[in-house]
Amino acid sequence: NSRINLNDGYVEVFKNKCWKAEGCVAYLVTIENKRILHTADSAEFSDHIKSIKEKIDLCFIACFESNFNDYSEFLRIIHPKVTIPYHFNYEKEEEAKKLIEHLIHNGINSKFLAIGEEFEI
C-alpha cells in the first residue's frame, strides 16, 4: 500500500474492490492518534484491507442494501469503534437508517450523521 505523510499524521492507501469500478482504493487516515477508514464504494473487501490490525476509531461505509451482510461481515473483522454509512441519497435516508439497524443488530456500533451534524471521536 502507498502512504502519504502529513504534518500530524499520514494516509495509507489500500487497493480495494468497488462496485462498478475497475480500480478502487480505500483510505486509512491517522492523525492525532485517531484512525479513520474510508472504504469507498466497497462491498467486497480486499484481503489487504481486512488485515488491518490496529484500532479503527471511525469507519465510513457505503450504503447499498443488497450488501448489508457483506458490510457487517467486514466490520466484524476490523472492529471499528463506530461506523457511519454514507453514499446514499439524503432524500432517502431510510436506507442508511436500515443499515444502522442491521449493523447494531449484528453487534456493530453505528451512527447516522445528518448533513451539518458534528461528531467527535
Image: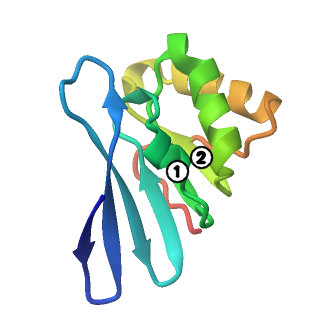
Direction from residue 32 to residue 15 in the image, left or right: left
Direction from residue 19 to residue 51 in the image, left or right: right
Direction from residue 63 to residue 2 in the image, left or right: left
Vertical position of residue 103 compared to residue 119: above or below: above
Q: At 72% across and 46% down in the image, what residue appears? A: 109
Residue 54 location, quadrant: bottom right
Vertical position of residue 102 compared to residue 23: above or below: above
Q: Secondary structure at mark 2?
A: strand
Vertical position of residue 83 compared to residue 34: above or below: above
Residue 52 location, quadrant: bottom right
**Residue type at the position of mark 2:** Thr
Residue 68 visible in rendering: yes
Which corner quadrant holds the N terminus?
bottom left
| Residue where numbered disc 2 is placed | 83
Q: At 39% across and 66% down in the image, what residue appears? A: 29
Task: Give the x, y percent position of residue 87.
Answer: 37, 31
Q: By what rule are the colours in the image chosen?
A: rainbow
Mark pair 2, 1: CA separation: 5 Å
Which corner quadrant holds the C terminus?
bottom right
| Residue where numbered disc 1 is placed | 59
Direction from residue 113 to residue 46 in the image, left or right: left
Q: Secondary structure at mark 1?
A: strand
Q: At 54% across and 27% down in the image, what residue appears? A: 96
Which circle's residue, 2 or 1, is located before the other in the chain? 1
